[in-house]
Image (cartoon, rainbow, N blue to C red):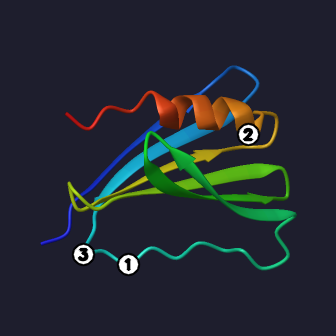
Amino acid sequence: RQMCIRDRFQDIEEHFIIIGCTNGNATLQIDTENASSVDNIEIDKHQVLKVIKNGYTHLVLINEEKNLFVTVFASDGIASEEAIKIMENISFS
């Protein structure tokens, strides 16, 4: 059974952040074609795929212990460092 939880936050200038959580049995498709950067980073001992494309930042964290994919998607106008700070503050307890 697949689970998906998604929240969207938007400011008055229409910049937005989407935070999602999906069980690890799901299939995620991340568009990396023509991305300006694709990197693997580590956040709180978890591997995170960081993709920056057209000014948008997409982070995908894999939590194998909890069998979860956690995503943070930030629109242009929001620095990738802000998306990373959000990901760093997600708790798995």
CA distance separating discs 2 and 1: 24 Å
CA distance separating discs 2 and 3: 27 Å
Q: Residues within 10 Å of mark 3 (few under 14, many from 20)?
A: few
Query: Residue 17: percent from the left, percent from the top?
Result: 58, 37
Query: Residue 75: percent from the left, percent from the top?
Result: 71, 43
Q: Which residue is mark 3?
A: 25
Q: Is residue 14 left or right of residue 86?
A: right
Q: Residues within 10 Å of mark 2 (few under 14, many from 20)?
A: many
Q: Is residue 1 left or right of residue 88?
A: left
Q: Nearer the viewer, residue 53 or 93?
A: 93
Q: Nearer the viewer, residue 1 or 13?
A: 1
CA distance separating discs 1 and 3: 7 Å
The secondary element bearing badge 2 is classed as helix
Residue at 21% x, 61% y is 3
Q: Is residue 26 left or right of residue 74?
A: left
Residue at 85% x, 76% y is 34
Nearest to N terminus: mark 2 or mark 3? 3
Looking at the image, is 21 positioned above or below residue 84? Answer: below
Looking at the image, is 86 positioned above or below residue 40? Answer: above
Which part of the image, by quadrant, shows the C terminus? Answer: top left
Q: Nearer the viewer, residue 46 or 11?
A: 46
Query: Residue 56: percent from the left, percent from the top?
Result: 75, 51
The secondary element bearing badge 3 is classed as loop
User: In the image, what residue type sits under mark 2?
Assistant: Ser
User: In the image, what residue type sits under mark 3?
Assistant: Asn
Q: Which residue is mark 1?
A: 27
Q: Which residue is mark 2?
A: 80
